[in-house]
Image (spheres, rainbow, N blue to C red):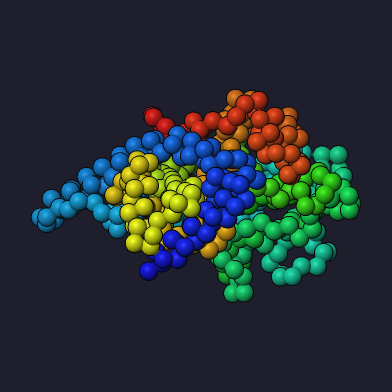
Amino acid sequence: DNTAVIAQLVKLRAERAALLGYASHAAYQLEDESAGSPAAVRDMISQVAPAALARARAEAADIQALIDTQARLNGTPSFTLQPWDWSFYAQQVRKARYDFDQARVAPYFELDHVLQDGVFYAAHQLYGLSFKERRDLPVYQPDVRVFEVSDADGEPLALFLADYFARDNKQGGAWMAAYVTQSRLLHHKPVVANHLNIPKPQAGQPVLLSFDEVTAMFHEFGHALHGMLSRVRYPKLAGTAVPRDFVEYPSQYNEMWAREPGVVAHYARHYQSGEPMPPELLEKVLAAQKFNQGYATTEYLAAALLDQAWHQISPAQAPSAAEVPAFEQAALRDSGLDYPPVPPRYHSTYFSHIFESGYSAGYYAYLWSEVLARDTGQWFHTHGGLTRANGDYLRTQVLSRGRSEDPQVLFRNFYGRAPEIAPLLEYRGLAGGS
């Protein structure tokens, strides 16, 4: 039972913020983030929530219809969808709607094709970068590949390490690491790496990926580009040394090229025959990416809302341990996110991100970054797509700047306006008619 710990933590955080002259812990935390204020975060949540909830209700109706149909066919009583049923039945709906065999898809996503003809290809088209493998350089693990990255004028820009395979002594997940940070002051060129955990096949077998793994490669390379294209004086402000709610922006933006038809046509080819993926199969793969996004977005927003609710209170408003459950219920109810089939991704008593992992008042950050990323995708769509001029413009205005300027100023200078929510809703399949 962590209710007493929560009550103590939120009160102490509120008291500290008050002593420092802030209205709340959230106001204190967000001052240095790109959102800038709790009001901006609340506004984002309130704009996305109605569309997410509407889609979640539609998804729930589809699942309930499946439950009722199976009960009728089996001659058993039906039941009302509960949160613990969602994942099991959602996968059945997914299979019926987007039925494709992963074994049929994977041969079109061979790792080296995805890397060379997808990830590197998009970077070359956008920024003029070229990649030369350096087998002469020492590596810490035989599977790691090193690429010398050169700019359009042939000038060496960075070293990129591709560490894609899982191994026993490697932590899970996927991440980017900057081993040497760019600095004009110190004349340092960046050395960055992408670390993934793709299962390594037996010797002589091709490395065939799922589309989720393809997306992860593009995502992490977005972080790598942020580090490699940096052009600032001080290493403390270089590359990905930006606010938490901005750091995922370049990576999420770069994901979109994994779905861009011109890029997909370049890398999604059968590793043996070289034939492109059949259009009907590709259509199913891409359409499936929007499945269950009502649920995923709603559960995330509910957790982000709880985070803000806990950290926007004054010391006098801090609840007692006994009042913690009621505080959570009231916060969800008042925000309209109290939808029983889709509970928050984390309830308060096990929400470790905000109570022990440094994300207090910051759980909103991933979606905030995605708003910027999807709006940037919309900008590319309306300005001609995958072109060198567009890439150079984004590079000059955002990717090269690190934290040398306020992130929201960077975005406004790039786009000419504040970010908008609509492209995010469209990308996630939450907009009307998506």
Of 80 and 44, the residue lying toward us: 44
Of 224 and 267, the residue lying toward us: 224
Q: Position of residue 133 (x, y in %)?
A: 77, 56
Q: Residue furthest left?
A: 75
Q: State the residue at coordinates (61%, 47%).
A: 21
Q: Residue furthest bottom?
A: 168
Of 217 and 1, the residue lying toward us: 1
Q: What quarter of the picture does the N terminus occupy?
A: bottom left
Q: Position of residue 302 (x, y in %)?
A: 41, 48
Q: State the residue at coordinates (79%, 58%).
A: 180
Q: State the residue at coordinates (79%, 49%).
A: 149
Q: Position of residue 191 (x, y in %)?
A: 78, 56
Q: What quarter of the picture does the C terminus occupy?
A: top left
Residue 209 showing in the rendered view: no
Q: Position of residue 125 (x, y in %)?
A: 71, 37
Does residue 119 appear left or right of residue 2 in this picture?
Answer: right
Q: Quadrant of residue 75?
A: bottom left
